[in-house]
Image: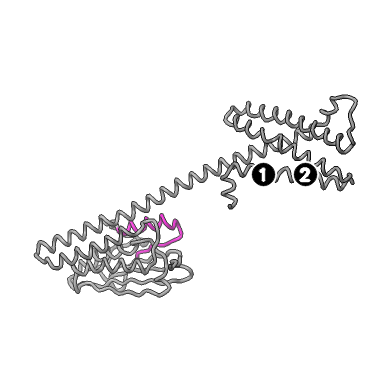
Amino acid sequence: MNWQQLVDNRQRFFWVLQIAGWIGYALVNYIGSKVFEMRDIYVFVILLNAYAGCLMTVPLRYLYRRVWNAKPWILVLVVFGVSYITGTLWSVVQKFNLWEIYRHGYRPDEWFYYFQQGLDSVYIILCWSGLYFGIKYYQLLQGERQKALKANTMAHEAQLKMLRYQLNPHFLFNTLNAISTLILVEENKDANKMVSRLSDFLRYTLNTDPIKKVALEQELHALSLYLDIERVRFDDRLAVQMDISDEARGALVPSLILQPLIENSLKYAIAQMTQGGVISVKAQVFAKELLLEVSDNGPGTELKDGQLLHAGGVGIANTKDRLKTLYENNYSFVLSGNTPTGLTVNIRIPFEKAVTE
């Protein structure tokens, strides 16, 4: 059991601190007895006093729990009043132990001597009460912090799911449009092939947790399924070049992070060129960061400060939002013109190595 689990288990945490605290009290008194050269029997007196203090403070816990939500002034009165009574009674027990054991049954002339010089004991009980309330407030703050973190995590996951699932209908709409066109021009064989590839791709997207990251190797496999669908539509007009380092293949990336970028290139580059074009995908690891690049040789578009001037689709905006949600400020997403023509998308994210089973 780690420290956080111990703090969360309030019952066990109380008893651990209660016993440890009174053992510490006994140890401090024992060291003091060595300084004043007390007899060995005084050790037994110390143990009895610590044991009595431990027992007498246990009921305070239950009393404080009952008045926990009371008004502040009532709480203060209860704490000081109960601490004074408990401290005074504990002082009587300590004097009894000292006189009965250490001084061999000594009896004072007056009974009120049992209650004298009890302020030290009252101060110790007040310190115990202060520690109790301090630790109790700490536990409450930790509980509220955990609730806030849990709520933040749930919102974070919900946002990621929304962004990931936003891709599916967008891509599905475009693909079904293409299938419908193939059917209209009576290219049934190509339409059937496209439906088959589409089912494989959708099966992958449904089996992949939108929250978890996947190995780039797995992402490239999903990308090949998607490109198989598009090749039915573009045929030899679509050429794809891959330059992926071995180390980069084992890196963790958000699922379907490349697909909307490829789709963007297909829509605004390849589809606009009668002779078709080339899409290039590169990935490498450098300085503990994964560098991804998707580029095309299409007509390009207007850019300002690395951003699109006229952005009409959801692919690029969705990808940026997902990266922001996952990595906060520890990433970069830059658009630039390709040479001689086209658009290049550069992504930089922290390198995380996928665990191989």
Question: What number of labels is visible?
Answer: 2
Q: Position of residue 96 (x, y in %)?
A: 83, 33
Identify residue type, mark 2.
Ala
Identify residue type, mark 1.
Leu
Quadrant where the C terminus is found in the figure? bottom left
Checking the image for residue 352, the label placed there is none
* Chain part drawn in magenta: 315-335
Compared to 301, does 59 lie above or below?
A: above
Q: Magenta includes 320?
A: yes
Q: Quadrant of residue 163?
A: bottom left
Label 1 crowd (10 A; few <14 / some 14-19 / many >=20):
few
Rendering colour mode: one colour
Image position of 59 (left or right of 254): right
Q: Main secondary structure of the magenta part?
A: helix
Checking the image for residue 26, the label placed there is 2
Label 2 crowd (10 A; few <14 / some 14-19 / many >=20):
many
Q: Magenta includes 334?
A: yes
Q: Position of residue 74 (x, y in %)?
A: 63, 26
Compared to 288, does 98 lie above or below?
A: above
The alpha-carbon separation of the residues under discs 1 and 2 comes to 14 Å
The first of marks 1 and 2 along the sequence is 1
Residue drawn 60% across the image and 39% down it: 136
Checking the image for residue 17, the label placed there is 1
The one nearer the camera, 356 or 265, is 356
Q: Position of residue 168 (x, y in %)?
A: 27, 56
Image position of 153 (left or right of 207): right
Compared to 169, does 88 lie above or below?
A: above
Residue drawn 33% across the image and 71% down it: 281
Q: Position of residue 32 (x, y in %)?
A: 83, 45
Q: Secondary structure at mark 1?
A: helix
The one nearer the camera, 30 or 81, is 30
Q: Quadrant of residue 297?
A: bottom left
